[in-house]
Image (spheres, helix red, strand yellow):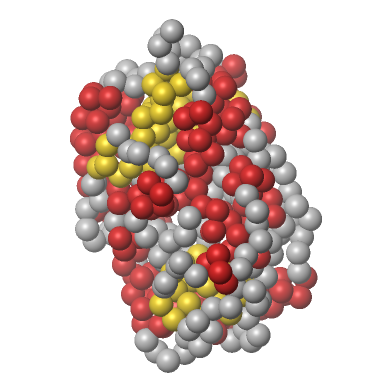
Amino acid sequence: MSRRKICVVVASRANYGRVKYLLKAISSHPELELQLIVGASALLERFGKAEKVIRADGFVPAHTIHYVVEGETLETQAKSTGMGIIELTTAFSNLKPDMVVTVADRFETMATAIAASYLNIRLVHLQGGEVSGNIDDRVRHAITKLADFHFVATEQSRERVVRMGEAPEMVFNYGCPAMDVLTHEDMSISNELMSRYGGVGESIDWEKPFLLMVQHPVTTSFGDGLQQIQATLSALAEVEGYQKIVLWPNPDAGSDDVSKGIRLFRESGKAQGFHFFRNFSPEDYARILANAHCAIGNSSSFLREGSFLGVPVVLVGDRQQDREHGENIAFSGYAKSDVLETVLRQLKHGRYPASRIFGDGRTGERIAAELTTLPLIYNKRIQY
């Protein structure tokens, strides 16, 4: 019996962290054949070149595709989506997969969904049905309507996808596959383990208290990223007694403004105790988050993995304002005073109870098993 060909598209460092254990489960399943496409910012050095981590983990891409238009503006984001559709269509036509797997809500995800749908390839969507409160909602829900099969991360998301008209028997809540990293890996951290990462800034002792900052641009407030990131960095500079780990932003529209803010701050002479990194492996990023005394910014990982771990989080701005989350989240506006006050409050509180709203860390194997049974000929029934 021939194996089912499952094509997974990884187009960013976040994508890879989400699906690494799904890739492992597909690769090891006797009835499945993994076809991996790596593209977009996952190939770019300035965003950490996740491709290097992927290959070091033993995954060999069937295709690598460049489709990020330089500039990180609203226009280049739209053009990157168009290029992705063109390039992925060629790759899918060559690989002839039985199913294509796409993740979450980014412009690369939209390109994957459109290309697969127009080629009549069954589309599997991970992390649909969520609400965050910005343009990602429109993209995510549009992909839900293009997808044939849905692997959501929470029960609320499952109910929302069904209310959108998707067949209930094709919507599965097995949790978020990013949790698998947290349950399968040792979360302890050490200077020896982290010595392979360079970065820029003052030297870091990973065995002493530190804060983690990850703040991405917000597409719906394009043009404000410089002021937003400067306020957050200035607030953290006033938090005494903690080292500060800052991760470079993603390539969404406005990334150049956020990157500029980081560079200006780094060169201002006020970045004592700060160290800036481009990327980590999924395991090492999880270790950093697990051992941080507080995480600050607007990364969805703070709500997912952060809630799972009980890490105190200050969620800055409105990028994730409507998402489900555990007790560990405290919301802050963009003002420096607001960020500083909320960080100090979270540091005083300390760790929170672990939450399992995003699953128990066995998602990848469950999804892989389901992929062996899903119908390859499936006529979607719209249930308005």
The answer to which image quadrant residue 157 occupies is: top right
Residue lying at 69% horizontally and 64% vertically, measured from the top left: 312
Farthest bottom residue?
269
Q: Taking the image as drawn, is residue 96 in sight?
A: yes
Residue 306 vs residue 31: left or right? right
Left or right, residue 203 beside residue 377: right
Q: Residue at x 27, y 42 (%)?
A: 64
Q: Is residue 189 above or below residue 125?
A: below
User: Is 165 placed above or below 64 here?
Assistant: above
Q: Is residue 150 among the parts visible in the rendering? A: no
Question: Measured along the vertical axis of the image, is residue 72 above or below residue 102?
Answer: below
Q: Position of residue 208 (x, y in %)?
A: 65, 77
**Residue 105 location (% of width, % of height):** 44, 43
Vertical order, 218 against 39 (above or below): below
Q: Is 242 on the left or on the right of 41, as rendered?
A: right
User: Horizontal and vertical percent for residue 169?
Assistant: 59, 16
**Residue appearing at x 61%, y 68% in the figure:** 190
